[in-house]
Image (cartoon, rainbow, N blue to C red):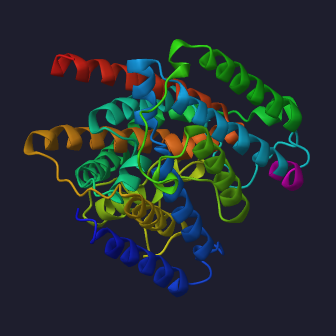
Amino acid sequence: MPLTSRPLVAAAAIAALIAILLSLPERDALGRSLPVSFALGAGFGLVLQRSRFCFWCIARDWFADRDPRGLLGIIAALAVGAIGYAAVFGAWLPDPFAGRLPPDAHIGPVSLTLALGAFVFGIGMALSGSCISAHLYRLGEGAFGSVVALLGALAGFVLGFLSWNTLYLLDIHRARVIWLSAWLGHSGALAATLAVLGATALWLSRQPGAEAQDPPDPRPALARRWPAVVGGILVGWIAVLAYFRVGPLGVTAELGSVARTSAMAVGLLPTVLHGLDGFAGCATVVKETLLSRNGVFVIGMVLGSTVAATLAGDWKPAWPGLRAVPRLLLGGVLLGWGAMVALGCTVGVLLSGIMAGALSGWIFLLACLAGAWIGWRARNWATGG
């Protein structure tokens, strides 16, 4: 894009941010602050874009080059978030052994379906080239191939809803919700989480690729990419603020709700989805109003990323080639199906789940990495790489 037009795009995105922020109702139907959710979404999109906080990119850097910097950024986010969540939990639920779960926390059921969904999600990341959150922030960079992947994700959500009752009867109805604090206490769960994260970070820092450095960036300091660890720390703080004020981080609830509402309207889905609305995670609903906490968060993400990308010179509009469309679409379908049956994605289950001390978050992490590795190997084989 010509340099003269980038400030215009940035100005338009900033104007849209301000206009939406000023026009939003103060609360949604559940009493949660829509302006706060929108502002946090804008900050989240800005941080993801500037620090390249994309789970697929991070995994690929590790698979291909043993570059651990992105993984260390994820660890930083999880550590900051776990500490912040523990502080909030200690105030809201002082006795973790009382048999109650923290309000709204993404502490989901542990099942084979969860692992399968995360595994399929990982393959979808590899095929489409991003996780769902990264596809959203890349819209702000002008990567219009992400539109194809997100349309595929909507279709994948519908397929997930269609398969839900079968999976529920075969597996999910037996699933247990395991919250580490209910077993170890707040301090014990936090200590265990930080011990695993610390040991992993120490191991990664000793790998050969730990000394990797990016080539010199001639751009001004403010236009350069942020280190992954800086991005991770900021993501952790945003996650804590989001949970404290409006709810856990997540990016798939709105996509899933749009898919569920549309499919229900044309009679595609069964009337009852067994047990779905009783589980914690990126909850989907049949929408009755246009505005939702997660919806405005996602809109803020895209606009925040657009502002960051244009000001840094990363706004580079690009349309996918025709040969890439089937791969993007299939990858998006796998992302949507995996996120639906796992009750969230790399943000809603992995980040928010692990921060909350949910065993489901750790299972999602391991299964998603396995799927991403399989997908990476398959793409290399298909392209002769």
Image location (x, y in percent) of residue 271: 38, 57
- Give the residue at x 47% y 49%: 224
- Placement of 371 over or under 105, stated as above or below: above
Q: Nearer the viewer, residue 30 or 308?
A: 308
Q: Residue 151 at what x, y percent from top left? A: 26, 54
Q: How many marks?
A: 0
Spot occupied by residue 82 in the image (x, y as percentages of width and height): 74, 41
Q: What residue appears at the point 70 percent right and 33 percent down from the top-left corner? A: 178
Is residue 288 placed above or below 112 in the rendered structure?
Answer: below
In this rendering, does residue 360 appear at all? no
Residue drawn at x 81%, y 52% as measured from the top left: 88
Q: Is residue 137 left or right of residue 238?
A: left
From the viewer's side, name the closer residue of 68 and 161.
68
Q: Residue at x 35, y 45 (%)?
A: 336
Q: Which corner quadrant holds the C terminus?
A: top left
Kindly tell me whether residue 224 is visible in this rendering. yes
Q: Residue furthest right?
A: 94
Q: Is residue 78 left or right of residue 312?
A: right
Measured as percent of width and height from the top left, residue 294 is found at: 51, 63
Magenta span of residues: 88-93
Give whichever of 225, 113 is nearer the camera: 225
Say left or right for 259 vs 326.
Answer: right
- In the image, residue 224 lies in the stretch drawn in magenta: no
Q: Would you identify the image quadrant in which residue 2 lies?
A: bottom left
